[in-house]
Amino acid sequence: MDKNYAIEINGLTKSFKGMYALNGLNMHVPVGAIYGFIGENGSGKSTTEKLICGLLVPDNGEIKLFGKDYSDPGVRVRVGALIENAGCFPGSSVWTNLMMQAINLGIENPNEEIERVLKIVRMEESKQIKFKSCSLGMKQRIGIAMALLGDPALLILDEPINGLDTDGMRIMREILVDITKNYGCTVLISSHILGELEKIATHYGIIRQGKMIMEISSEEMDSRCRVFISLKTKDMDQALDILKKKFNKVKEENGYLKVYDVDEVELIVGYLMRHGHVVSEIVKNKIGLEEYYIEIMSNKGGEINE
Ligand SMILES: Nc1ncnc2c1ncn2[C@@H]1O[C@H](COP(=O)(O)OP(=O)(O)OP(=O)(O)O)[C@@H](O)[C@H]1O
Ligand SMILES: [Mg+2]
């Protein structure tokens, strides 16, 4: 068993009323990673996170945290989580809520620990505000502060940036990078906001119908994110046929012809000109996480586990 994984899951199965939510899921989250967990609605992300946190009981399979079985009390105390909501008392202050949780967890120096986590989530100045008066962004940060009490080595966050504005997302991003870089924490984060995830994730796991279909590091993802050129001509159908004769991967999408793995605009314009097509619009692009994800998800050819 590899201790370099904060989370290692093998063959995890969970069903609800005879329907599989997870169907033999495998997962490998390296220590120190910010692991972006991506998948369609209902694909099993929250179920996986709840199982790791011990909020649900698996039907089958194995969950290892830092090389030990996830039920080991020694590793359980190293896990902090924010799933669904922070579970705070609305009429109590930020500080009181944190204190109740700290006492609940049996933390030795609660005052010091609360100051520590408030500093990480940048809420030292807001500790006297009632929870119900906090903005959504603040509430999410309080949730992270709650999860950070007791200095966990692994933080599990279910959609923590949903509904946040640009500034809220930026602060959250900085906090998560800080937690991994300066506090040595590993972060598992599920999100639908791929453009944001792309800015911080070091690894990705893509889940579909309860199975991991791909795990990939952001470096590997970068090297796979190919360049492509999108263009418009008057007769798109004819131009598509002509492009297909010369270039390996060409497709029509959203009103554009896309030519992959070519980054010389002149080559394409010249070629089409020679065949009687005038290009009216042309742009050079690089596939980002979003495009890459759509491409993988449209490949319905089963498991691509790598
Ligand atoms: N407590 C439950 N009882 C019955 N079915 C459930 C329960 N929890 C989850 N499911 C089902 O399990 C499947 C996976 O749900 P899950 O919430 O894990 O998906 P998700 O990937 O988190 O989706 P989303 O992106 O919408 O949050 C879904 O089909 C869901 O309806
Ligand atoms: Mg979910």
Image (cartoon, grey):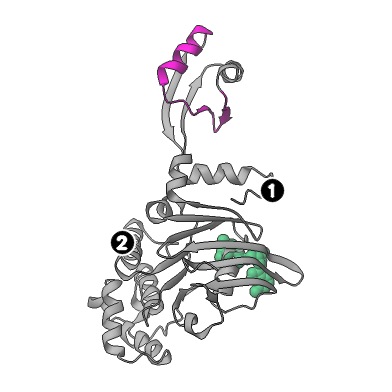
> Where residue 304 appears, x then y in whole percent?
63, 48
Which circle, 2 or 1, is nearer the viewer? Answer: 1
Q: Amino acid at mark 1?
A: Gly
Observer-nearest of 102 and 92: 102
Seen in the image, is 44 located left or right of residue 167? Answer: right
How busy is the neighbourhood of tag 1: few (under 14 within 10 Å), some, or many (20 plus)?
few
Whether the residue carrying mark 2 lies under 8 Å from ligand 2 is answered with no
Segment colored magenta: 248-276
Q: Residue 138's quadrant in the figure? A: bottom left
> Where residue 62 appears, x then y in whole percent?
62, 71
**Residue 8 in view here:** yes
Give the residue at x 38% y 56%.
Answer: 200
Q: Residue furthest left?
A: 125
Q: Amino acid at mark 2?
A: Glu
Picture layout, residue 32 above or below residue 274: below
Seen in the image, is 60 located left or right of residue 275? Answer: right
Q: Residue 89's quadrant in the figure? A: bottom left
Give the residue at x 43% y 22%.
Answer: 281
Q: Quadrant of ligand 2?
A: bottom right
Upstream in the sequence, badge 2 or badge 1? Answer: 2
Q: Secondary structure at mark 2?
A: helix
Observer-nearest of 102 and 29: 29
**Residue 92 in view here:** no
> Where residue 140 appears, x then y in whole percent?
39, 70
Asked if the magenta segment contains residue 150, the reply would be no
Residue that carries the numbered disc 1 in the rendered image:
302
- The numbered mark at residue 174 is 2
Observer-nearest of 165 and 84: 84
Picture layout, residue 151 above or below residue 165: below
Q: Are marks 2 and 1 in contact (CB under 8 Å)?
A: no
